């Protein structure tokens, strides 16, 4: 890792800590030449995953596309940066568990919706309305009613 201050090629790790979700490591580093200290973040990365788009095109997995869609869905919702990062990591783990090098974009959307439904129902509805291309208010209402029915069933099971 190059020093941010003097660009020297050698630094040493002074301290390493797991981040709260356990899927990233924060390292404190020191330059061996100028003694400048800085932190780095090491995260799991999905490699060699190709997304098969609905139009038949293939493209490499791009985390920023998922982040962008989730940010729009979660806009003005009570979610911390930490929870957002954890959500992204959970989605990527779910994609890795599929054990395939090529995945249809619709499957990626399904994984995202499943995780969003557990995280924030409003964000889930926002995402679903775009992803499922809700045509009218009736379709929107049906999806909300499904969520409410599941919530009532959960409450009854707990009793």
Image (cartoon, helix red, strand yellow):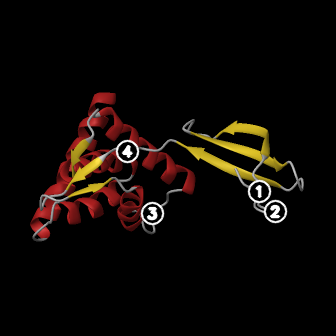
Q: Give the residue at mark 2.
A: 6
Using the rendered view, name the quadrant where residue 21 is placed: top right
Decide which of 11, 70 is in the foreground and name it.
Answer: 11
Q: Nearer the viewer, mark 3 or mark 1?
A: 1
Q: Which residue is mark 1?
A: 3
Q: Earlier in the sequence, mark 1 or mark 4?
A: 1
- Judged by depth in the image, the label closer to the viewer, 1 or 4, is 1
Question: Picture coordinates of residue 136 (x, y %)?
Answer: 10, 71
130 left or right, relative to 46: left
Residue highlighted by disc 3: 77
What is the crowding at mark 4: few (fewer than 14 residues within 10 Å), some, or many (at least 20)? many
Marks 1 and 2: in contact by CB < 8 Å? Answer: yes
**CA gap, disc 2 to disc 3?**
41 Å
> Mark 2 or mark 3, which has the lower sequence index?
2
Q: Nearer the viewer, mark 4 or mark 2?
A: 2
Spatial CA span between label 4 and label 2: 38 Å
How far from the left and from the top, in percent, is residue 101? 27, 40
Residue at the (30%, 56%) spot, across then down: 124
Expressed as whole percent of the image width and height from the top left, the position of residue 87 reads 44, 48
């Amino acid at each position: 890792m190059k020093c941010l201050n003097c660009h020297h090629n050698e630094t040493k790790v002074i301290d390493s800590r797991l981040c709260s979700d356990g899927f990233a490591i924060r390292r404190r580093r020191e330059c061996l030449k100028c003694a400048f200290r800085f932190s780095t973040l090491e995260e799991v990365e999905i490699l060699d995953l190709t997304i098969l788009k609905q139009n038949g095109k293939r493209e490499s997995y791009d985390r920023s596309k998922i982040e962008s869609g989730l940010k729009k869905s979660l806009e003005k919702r009570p979610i911390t940066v930490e929870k957002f990062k954890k959500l992204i990591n959970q989605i990527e783990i779910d994609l890795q568990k599929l054990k395939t090098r090529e995945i249809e974009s619709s499957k990626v959307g399904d994984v995202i919706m499943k995780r969003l439904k557990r995280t924030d129902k409003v964000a889930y509805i926002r995402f679903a309305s775009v992803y499922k291309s809700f045509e009218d208010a009736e379709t929107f209402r049906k999806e909300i009613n499904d969520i409410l029915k599941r919530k009532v069933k959960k409450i009854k099971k707990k009793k």
